[in-house]
Amino acid sequence: MHYFYKILLIILLNISLFLSIAKADTLTEFEQQLAEYKGKVVYLDFWASWCIPCLRSFPWMNEIQQKYSNEDFAVFSVNLDADKSFATAFLEKTPANFPVFYDLKGKVAKAFKLRGMPSSYIIDRTGKIVSSHVGFNDEKKVAYQTEIEKLIHK
């Protein structure tokens, strides 16, 4: 019986280790992908298929991705749907001309301590977050684009 408990403990420790690694892998993968943009100004956008303002932000993000792509600028987005099929359906109707990272368990969102949807961050060429935003509308779009242009032309 004592042998049984040792085996059970080893199994439980391995499961715990696996879950820790799985959690770290999502954040590590996100950080690695985001690091590929170092040296560029980045508009980092967190979105979900159910978010109405997110639907309105996609045409603008596609537009700025295209407009500033030759000026060391990139849009990088993080989808927060727990079921990837919802994001896929959203993207079929509203395509993204920029990379999408899938945060199915919300680990990246939790690390960023999101306050609402959509949430976005503007990151300078050194990789430093210079501003954060919640929501999207025409007024905010103008403000976001002004911030981006200032960093691009800095």
Image: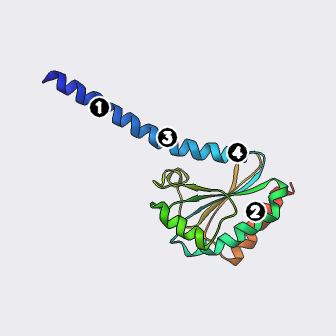
Which x, y percent locates residue 141? 71, 72
Q: Is residue 147 visible?
A: no
Count of marks placed on residues: 4
> What whole-number distance in Å separates the C-alpha atoms at marks 4 and 2?
16 Å
Look at the picture and state if 106 lies above or below 27.
Answer: below
Look at the picture and state if 126 lies above or below 150.
Answer: above
Instruction: Name the kind of residue labelled 1 in the image.
Output: Ile
- Tell me the residue at 56%/76% (across/down): 52
Find disc 2 in the rendering and name its residue.
65
Going from the N terminus, do you reach mark 1 or mark 2 first?
Answer: 1
The quarter in which the N terminus is drawn is: top left
Secondary structure of the residue carrying tag 1 is helix
Which x, y percent locates residue 75? 70, 59
- Is disc 2 in contact with disc 3, using a CB cutoff of under 8 Å? no
Q: Is residue 71 visible?
A: yes
Instruction: Name the kind of residue labelled 4 in the image.
Output: Glu
Residue that lies at the very extreme toward the front in this rendered image: 92
Find disc 4 in the rendering and name its residue.
36
Secondary structure of the residue carrying tag 4 is loop
- Is disc 4 in contact with disc 1, using a CB cutoff of under 8 Å? no
Residue that lies at the very extreme toward the left in this rendered image: 1
> What whole-number distance in Å separates the C-alpha atoms at marks 3 and 4?
18 Å
Which x, y percent locates residue 100? 61, 57
> What whole-number distance in Å separates the C-alpha atoms at marks 4 and 1?
37 Å
Q: Which mark is residue 24?
A: 3
Going from the N terminus, do you reach mark 1 or mark 3 first?
Answer: 1
